Image: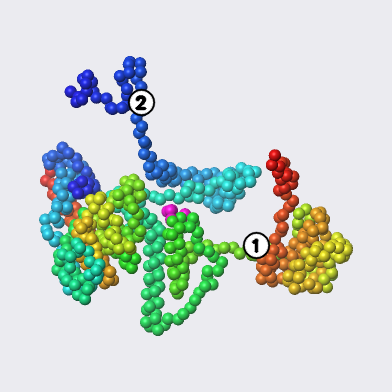
Amino acid sequence: RPAQAASLLRRSDPAGRAPGRGTAGRGPDAAAAPGSAAAPAVSEPEGDSLNDRILREPLKHSDFFNVKELFSVRSLFDARVHLGHKAGCRHRFMEPYIFGSRLDQDIIDLEQTAAHLQLALNFTAHVAYRQGIILFVGRNRQFSHLIENTARDCGEYAHTRYFKGGLLTNAPLLLGPMVRLPDLIIFLHTLNNVFEPHVAVRDAAKMNIPTVGVVDTNCNPTLITYPVPGNDDSPPSIQLFCRLFRTTINRAKEKRRQVEALYRLQGRAGARLDLGHSP
Amino acid sequence: MWKGGEDGKPPRKAGRREPRLGPRSWILRLRHTTVVSTKKNIAALRRETYTLDFIKKQIEEFNIGKRHLANMMGEDPETFTQEDIDRAIAYLFPSGLFEKRARPIMKHPEQIFPKQRAIQWGEDGRPFHFLFYTGKPSYYSLMHEAYGKILDVEKHQNQLRAQGLFSEKTKTKDLIGSRWLIKEELEEILVEKLSDQDYAHFIRLLERLLTLQRGGAEEEFVQRFRRSITIQSKKQLIEPVRYDEQGMAFSRSEGRRKSAEAEAVVYAHGSGRVSVNGTHYLRYFPVTQDREQLMFPFHFLDRLGKHDVACTVSGGGRAAQAGAIRLAVARALCTFVTEEEVEWMRQAGLLTADLRVRERKKPGQEGARRKFTWKKR
């Protein structure tokens, strides 16, 4: 979504761009507003590259936020993530993710789950780092309270209630004229109370919103951007997923705060050096 | 230069005009375009009528006006309360209108302008409430809170049970004299539209919380959604006991029925003698039915021979006078009787004045209700 990324960039740059200013004009400009609160305003042409650097740096690494250390195949097994439904409930598109079947109960392949989970957590961390809106969706009433608490603890949003038809597709009417839609939707349950695919899966795909979803053996993983094959019915499994998402999001936000503070200090130090040099 | 134009002129919008019929007949045929007016536009106009600045200005004006009013009335502007304002306005702008709401009022703008929702998100577009994307954030956060409290109470109960300190106790006394909030009141508090199922679900959740043994915090949370109902009998005016020259305790009260007005004096101790307008009641009311009406309050309270009555009555007819005396006697008896018995009398209808009056005859009809005989032809 290049338009969304560009708008994110533009929004996070408070000073805005001033075309036509050369690097030579930094001295007198810096002198005019040396102690201003917005550091980019001090070093105007540097401001763009500062923000660009903040946003580009994490993309150069494959696991910038080190999400691999948060879980292991053993911890997934202990949380009973590998337990699927009975073979009769199996969805055809989930067959690649199923390790096998024991006493008619499907077992999910945890090696694949680990790989998918790492990708999903990494993506979530990047979205949180770029200050995107994350919406947690799940329609299992047993875990509704837990999911809402998780969302509140990370400072993100949750929707575990009756999903009104046009919420994403007709958002200006339902939510307000200039509403900002979520930038990522995390499904802890892909099915709704009548075991049909949740409407938000299809609507997110329509609105070009990337999705991360925990898909059980009876779910359809095709429309989900980052499916994570796993159990969505046991309490320990959902608690583990909630804990993982909460940790990654908090970690990413903390990292963003640190990086911004660091660059702000660097920017100020650079400006002071320039002031020293200017006649 | 322009594609498609035959005369070298710019191509005309198809169907908008009919130029070929001659120089004087330019018919502007308007194409039928449907103006899609979404409900959102009208609702948004109504919603945005009162901006925050407007409300703030109104509040400032109200405060200044309050001080002016206090000065006008010669009172201290600092301690001028809302009741003082109401009295001052009623004095300065006397109105004979029956509808209280149509009379001039001066109240704080928050009570006059309907409550509206402030903007839900900040500069960066991120909504403030974590349940914003559900569509009904206040209602669902209330449900979330209530459910959280139920879980806490259950966890606490489980801990007590594990330690063996759990004891069964049922508290139902708190519910008497109060009712649940109605749907409209809840909508007003939340500033959100609710459906009947939402409201029913919420009440069910609160009742479930009530069935568990709860502590002070949960009790407070539930009481927020209860309103007290004033019991009618508490409003009953009971005459105080009076003593005459001989030291006999008596009570006097009045009663009315149709156009008969009666005043009854009931003595605390007596032998059941009743005198009406100076004469014995047997002589004044030859009909048994009237005497039964007189005796009914005593018969109801099992005090048939224990009180003396001396009453005066005027106006009305035979039965009307009897009814008036009955009401007066019942009211007088309240003084000598317990609160519970007063409530019983009220429920029996002894203390309610009978408002039935003769209905007027209408033109085009023979009587109040009777129509003229219907003739087919």
Q: Nearer the viewer, mark 1 or mark 2?
A: 2
Q: Who's the residue at 53% across and 51% down the image?
A: B78
Quarter of the rendering containing residue A225:
bottom left
What is the chain letter for disc 2? B
**Image quadrant where residue B178 sits:** bottom right
Res A259 seen here: yes
Display coloring: rainbow
Q: Chain of mark 1?
A: B
Give the residue pinned by disc 1. Answer: B235
Residue type, mark 1 in image: Lys
Neighbours of disc 2 within 10 Å: few (<14), some (14-19), many (20+): few
- The reply to whether residue B51 is in sight is no
Residue B373: image x %, image y %? 73, 44
For the residue marked with disc 2, what is the amino acid?
Arg
Instruction: Say if mark 1 contacts mark 2, CB within 8 Å.
Output: no
Nearer to the camera, B360 or A155: B360
Judged from the image, the secondary structure of the residue bearing numbered disc 2 is: loop
Which residue reaches farthest top? B23
Which segment is the magenta one?
B188-194
